[in-house]
Image (spheres, rainbow, N blue to C red):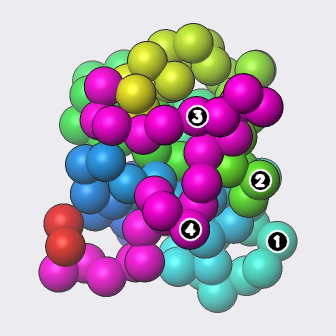
Amino acid sequence: MNFFERVYEVVEKIPYGQVATYGQIGWMVSGAPHAARTVGWALNGLPEDRINEVPWWRVINAQGRISNSRARHGAAEQRRRLEEEGIIFDDTDRTDLSVYQWNGNTKEA
């Protein structure tokens, strides 16, 4: 299984109403602390037939912000989906990772 497929496999486990960071996913997939950018590329390259199967919208940056300005799916769409799941953003467009960040426990998914 290639890196992108491993990313999709992990992202599929993020529970409804929780988020993970690009770096967190990169670490879980490869153990590499600098794999965040490659996780972003993987999600940007998500095949159309898997757009609703792999919850790409649950992956945000380490500051608790949406950072997909160059992605096929815009920040507004990502925020809409997260807010539908109960994720709250503050007036600086951040979400509180201490509240919403997934701990990586696959038993929750």
Front-lying residue, 32 or 62: 62
Chain-order first, disc 3 or disc 4: 3
Which residue shows up at 43% across the image and 77% down it?
A: 103
Chain-order first, disc 1 or disc 3: 1
Per the image, the residue denoted by label 2 is: 63
Marks 3 and 4 sit apart, C-alpha to C-alpha, by 13 Å
Query: Alpha-carbon neighbours of circle 3 within 10 Å: few (<14), some, or many (≥20)?
Result: some
Which numbered tag is attached to residue 34?
1
Specify start and end residues of the magenta stretch as a single range.
84-107
Labels 4, 2: front one: 4
Which residue shows up at 33% across the image and 59% down it?
A: 14
Per the image, the residue denoted by label 4 is: 98
Labels 1, 3: front one: 3
Q: Identity of the amino acid at label 4?
A: Ser
Quadrant showing the N terminus:
bottom left
Q: Secondary structure at mark 3?
A: loop
Q: Residue furthest front?
A: 91
Q: Identity of the amino acid at label 1?
A: His
Quadrant showing the C terminus:
bottom left
Chain-order first, disc 4 or disc 2: 2
Chain-order first, disc 3 or disc 2: 2
Looking at the image, do the residues carrying marks 3 and 4 touch, with CB atoms under 8 Å apart? no
Per the image, the residue denoted by label 3 is: 89
Looking at the image, do the residues carrying marks 1 and 4 touch, with CB atoms under 8 Å apart? no
Looking at the image, do the residues carrying marks 3 and 2 touch, with CB atoms under 8 Å apart? no
